[in-house]
Amino acid sequence: MASATQIPVSEYLQTSYRPDREYIDGEVRERKMGKREHAMIQAALAAWFWNHKQQWGIQVATEWRTRVSESRVRIPDVVIVARGPHEDVLATPPILAIEILSPDDTYADLQDRSHDYQVMGVETIWIIDPTTRTARMAHEDAWVEARRLTVPGTEIFVDIDELFSSL
C-alpha cells in the first residue's frame, strides 16, 4: 500500500482519485480492492436493488462518498437511500450501507468502518464475505449471521443463497 497523504477535508472533497480513496482524520487512504467475485456481488446487489427501487421507494448507488463525520469520508460498496434528492457527497445517513469483504480486509478495518457508519446514524449495515459465502447484518449494536438479510421496519431484503447462486 502506498504511503498516506495528509490534506484538509476541503481539498479531499474537491479531488478525484482513481480508484477513489477514503478520508480518515486528515489522511487520504487507498481502499482495499476486491477481486472478481467482489465485483460480481457488488453488481448483483446493485441490480437487485435497482429492480426493486420503485416497490421499496429507494435509490441504490455503488461507491458513493459518504461523510460519516466532519473528519471522515467512507465509500461503502453499496448504499441504499430513500428516493429523492441527495448531496453529491452523502451526508444524510443512508437506510443501508453494505460492505463486501476484500481478501485484504482485516477485522479491525471492518470494525472501524462499521463504527463510523453507526456514529453517522446508519441503522442497518450488512457485511458480505465472498470467501465463506456468508453474511452478517447489524442493526444498532447486534450483529447476526443470516441467510436472508433485512432492513428492520421495511420490505428491503436480499437472500444470500440466491445472491451467490447467481454468480
Image (cartoon, rainbow, N blue to C red):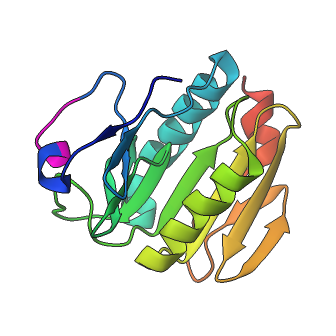
Drawn side of residue 145 relative to residue 79, left or right? right
**Image coordinates for residue 57, horizontal then vertical, percent:** 37, 66
Tell me: residue 55, above or below residue 70.
Answer: above
Can residue 155 be seen by looking at this rendering? Answer: no
**Image coordinates for residue 49, horizontal then vertical, percent:** 49, 48
Drawn side of residue 39 relative to residue 16, left or right? right
For the record, the magenta segment spans 12-16
Which image quarter is the C terminus in?
Answer: top right
- The residue at the point 79 percent across, 52 percent down is 135
**Image coordinates for residue 52, horizontal then vertical, percent:** 47, 52
**Image coordinates for residue 161, horizontal then vertical, percent:** 83, 42
In the rendered image, which quarter is residue 30 located in? top left
- The residue at the point 60 percent across, 61 percent down is 112
The residue lying toward the viewer, choosing from 147 and 22, is 22
- The residue at the point 50 percent across, 68 percent down is 117
Q: Is residue 14 part of the magenta span, yes or no?
A: yes
Drawn side of residue 32 relative to residue 17, left or right? right
Drawn side of residue 91 relative to residue 8, left or right? right
